[in-house]
Image: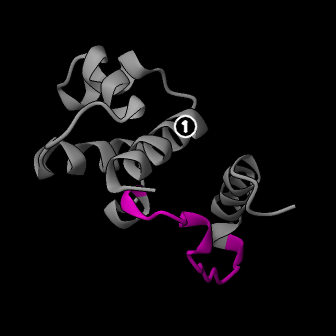
Amino acid sequence: MNETTTLANNLKRFRKAKRMRQKDLAQKVGLSQDSISKLELGKYRNLGMKYLTLICRELDVAIEELLMSSPQKLTIEIIASEKNMEFIRAFVEVARNFGLVK
């Protein structure tokens, strides 16, 4: 899998996990819906760090996650406490959506 395909697949997956439409993401980062569509199809090259950074902020992912060919191999350690249980529940739900936990 090349870098363009990896970015395309991850972008689409992360966007859908946030239940965000292409149009919504495009508006939030200052791109056209057509640009987001082309990115997700692997037809857009040389997006630039400015837009990659904005996309990552909107999707709440690290740039490494967007560019990794196997983001499911990312190890995450969470320390549970009463204060962050809501976050942990939301995290587990997202992880289930990605098929990372059963």
Relative placement, left or right, of 9 versus 72 is left
Residue 38 vertical placement versus 85 (above, below): above
- Dominant SS in magenta: loop
Residue pictured at 41% horizontal, 21% vertical: 22
Residue 8 vertical placement versus 84 (above, below): above
Query: Looking at this view, is 7 or 33 the one in front?
Result: 7
In the rendered image, residue 70, in percent from the top left (x then y), is placed at 54, 66
Residue pictured at 33% horizontal, 47% vertical: 4
Q: Is residue 68 magenta?
A: yes
Query: Looking at this view, is 87 or 51 the one in front?
Result: 51
Residue pictured at 47% horizontal, 20% vertical: 21
Residue 74 vertical placement versus 85 (above, below): below
Query: Looking at this view, is 1 or 54 the one in front?
Result: 1
Q: Which residue is mark 1?
A: 18
In the rendered image, residue 93, in percent from the top left (x then y), is placed at 74, 51
Residue pictured at 88% horizontal, 61% vertical: 102
For disc 1, the neighbor class at 10 Å (few under 14, some 14 to 19, many from 20) is: few
Which stretch did the figure color magenta?
Answer: 66-82
In the rendered image, residue 54, in percent from the top left (x then y), is placed at 23, 44
Q: Is residue 38 magenta?
A: no
Relative placement, left or right, of 4 versus 68 is left
Q: Which of the 4 quarters of the picture holds residue 24?
A: top left
Under mark 1, the amino acid is: Lys
Query: Looking at this view, is 89 or 9 the one in front?
Result: 9
Relative placement, left or right, of 15 versus 49 is right
**Kind of element beneath mark 1:** loop
